[in-house]
Image (spheres, rainbow, N blue to C red):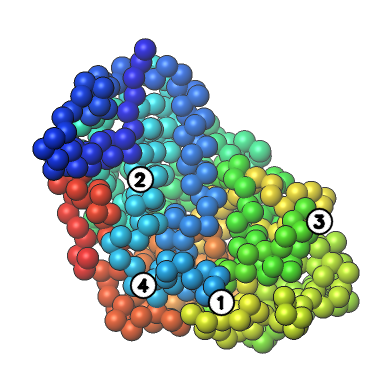
Amino acid sequence: MKKQFNLNIVILSLISIVALQSCSDLELEATDSVIQDVSFTGLADSEASLAGLYSSTWGMLTDQANFFALNEVTTDEQVIPTRGSDWGDNGLWRSLHNHTWKVDHGFLLSTWNQLNSKVLAATQIIDPLSNSSQQQVAEAKFLRAFNMFFVLDMWGQNPFREATDDPVSTPVVLSPAEAYAYILNDLNEAISVLPNTSPSNATKAASKAAANFLKAKLILNSERYTGATPNYQEVINAVDAVEASGFALQSGYFDIFLPSVDSETVLYGEIGIGNRIWNGMHYNIVTPDNGGGGWNGFSTLAEFYDLFEGDTNENYGLEDGTPLNNQEERRGFVPNASSATEDTNFGIGYGFLIGQQYSATGQPLSDRAGNPLNFTRDFSLTNSSETQAIRVIKYHPFDGTGSSSFRSHEIIFRFADAHLMRAEAMLRSGDSGGALAEVNELRVIRNATPLGSVSLDDMIDERGRELYVEFFRRNDLIRFGQFTKDWEFKDPAAVGDTNKNLFPIPLTALLSNPNLVQNPGY
């Protein structure tokens, strides 16, 4: 029988050794996992293992906690106020938004283990002993690069072991520059083999376009990892390659997030989107297949909402399909009493929900106490009412057919992101005219006023308007030097603290691997 190991078992086993050695009356038995014969001799079924790796990687993204929270709730885009006894959780959510997280924050260990275990799973598929096909190896290298990228980006150091390494040996730790080179090599090798997939239902798997997208993202951020100025022309080349595969900007912003094929979705996962819909909706906002309503948690700051064109105090209605009040399409709209049923959308708005909310029949909704369900700009982080704070909904329960709100289709890479990466590379390399043309091409499609010039501040704001809650906001803010800026409810002591650009290494990881070094400030 072929035997395998995974990183979580190794970590737990090492912790067990420490515990056992502290008890003089305990002895290791031959059945203990630490001393069993767990040498890697290859996978029995690489295709099944690859399918499992896709499932676990995309499954990691469906959660509202852990990976998503670390990349979004730590920014100005997402905040979870405590409302009565709801969402307090001993400060678990608040500490992320106000940058007071500690080394023992539970989301850190969970995400660290999730990402690193997937790196090892990919390495087992890639190992020659598994006799994987050339394409299976290429797909595994893409998935390894994906998971390694986020370990690098979030912690700045990557533990790594080969599939055939002794499972109780201490993994090596790659420096940021070493990890960057390793990821880039994986992507280049994957690109040479992966299929050239164009917009279709097949974009749920690795492709040349997906690997080029991640390559552009990696190189654009490379100064953080290598200390050297990024090769902006390589970023442009990688985005050009994505475009050459047939991907392009598409009009109809919220239609992009439906499960139908579109020109923007470079990579999607078969991921349940219930968290993306219901975590901010009020308890009394319902659909036929979710009579229990929302969970009344995730919200956004008024200052982030104000980045969008339109009246800052309301976000109402459609008239013949056109947003009112000269507001841009990406901000969305709240159906008013006369337009609530225009799109048969259960009365639920799109984008940013502020002001009075309505039912599918156009009736004003109430909160649980019978007061008007009127979402307000202002709120308290620790003691909000159930109607305070602007809510965000990008994936809508209505998919054009009235089918289940819990369909499985979430975008992972989108061409608009690549388009803006290319614009940023142009701007940073001195081509401000080219960058302005790229940004305005997108803005015109999104019903936003073209800019007369573009700066780095304009660029990060444009990325926020286009890509909100698509789990790259933390990465973007760090690259633009704004992750440590002041925003509402951030701890004043954390403002300007660049140590927050990396998360602390979880304590159990430090205990199990002395090659890891705790990041500064923790």
The answer to which of 278 and 36 lies nearer the viewer is 36
Q: Quadrant of residue 156?
A: bottom left
Q: Against 386, is 15 above or below?
A: above
Q: Amino acid at mark 2?
A: Asn
Do the residues bearing badges 3 and 2 touch, measured as CB atoms within 8 Å? Answer: no
Give how far across and how far down residue 133 sits, in percent: 44, 20
> Which quarter of the picture shows residue 483?
bottom left
- Residue drawn 65% across the image and 45% down it: 408
Looking at the rendered structure, the secondary structure element under dot 2 is: helix
Residue at 79% of width from left, 76% of height from top?
365
Which residue corresponds to mark 1? 84
Task: Report how far apart the C-alphas of labels 4 and 3 lie in the structure.
Answer: 39 Å
Q: Which residue is mark 2?
A: 113
Question: Between marks 1 and 3, how big is the CA–CA gap?
Answer: 28 Å
Query: x%, y% of residue 265?
Result: 61, 49
Q: Nearer the viewer, mark 4 or mark 3?
A: 3
Q: Which residue is mark 3?
A: 288
Quadrant including the C terminus: bottom left
Location of residue 353 by image quarter: bottom right
Is 500 on the left or on the right of 114, as rendered? Answer: left
Residue 91 pos. (x, y %): 42, 70
Quarter in which the N terminus is drawn: top left
